[in-house]
Amino acid sequence: MSSLNYRTAVLGASPNPDRYAYLAVERLKSHNIPVIPLGFRKGEIVGEEIILDWPQQIDNLHTLTLYIGPKRQPEFYNYIAQLKPSRVIFNPGTENRELYRLLQDNHIQFEEACTLVLLSTNQYMI
């Protein structure tokens, strides 16, 4: 499968280059994976404008990678389910059993993993 088929939304994208969400957008782009940075602060990451007004639908979304903690996630449960990604990646610190159940109920795959490690070990597109 081509990298173009792995369109990825980064939920919690940050304009701060010290944040892992920033690095995820940067690395996804360097792997030629189409990326949609969904964030809370205005800014850009390697030429990608952070989207503050999140779209209700993202066509051909393969992966949603989470960079917001479990305490903040509940307000986004419906949004995540509505997007219907093929998978959700729970990066370290974002694990959430309640959201796992919601994803299972909506037939959305998920995994506890680090997007940066998956990319660096060529396991992202498996």
Image (spheres, rainbow, N blue to C red):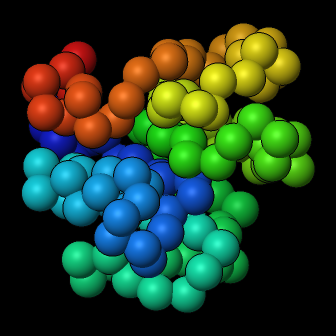
Q: Is residue 47 left or right of residue 13?
A: left
Image point (62%, 33%), residue name: 94
Q: Residue 118: percent from the left, percent from the top?
A: 25, 27
- The quadrant in which the C terminus is found is top left
Q: Residue 101: percent from the left, percent from the top?
A: 79, 13
| Front one among 57 and 45 | 45
- Taking 45 as reference, is 77 above or below it? above
Q: Quadrant of residue 56?
A: bottom right
Image point (50%, 63%), residue name: 13
Q: Is residue 89 left or right of residue 6?
A: right
Q: Residue 66: percent from the left, percent from the top?
A: 56, 42
Q: Is residue 107 left or right of residue 102?
A: left
| Front one among 65 and 106 | 65
Image point (50%, 17%), residue name: 111
Image point (77%, 15%), residue name: 97
Q: Is residue 59 in view from this perspective?
A: no
- Taking 2 as reference, is 79 above or below it? below
- Taking 40 as reference, is 11 above or below it? above
Q: Residue 110: percent from the left, percent from the top?
A: 55, 19
Q: Residue furthest bottom?
A: 42
Q: Is residue 18 in view from this perspective?
A: yes
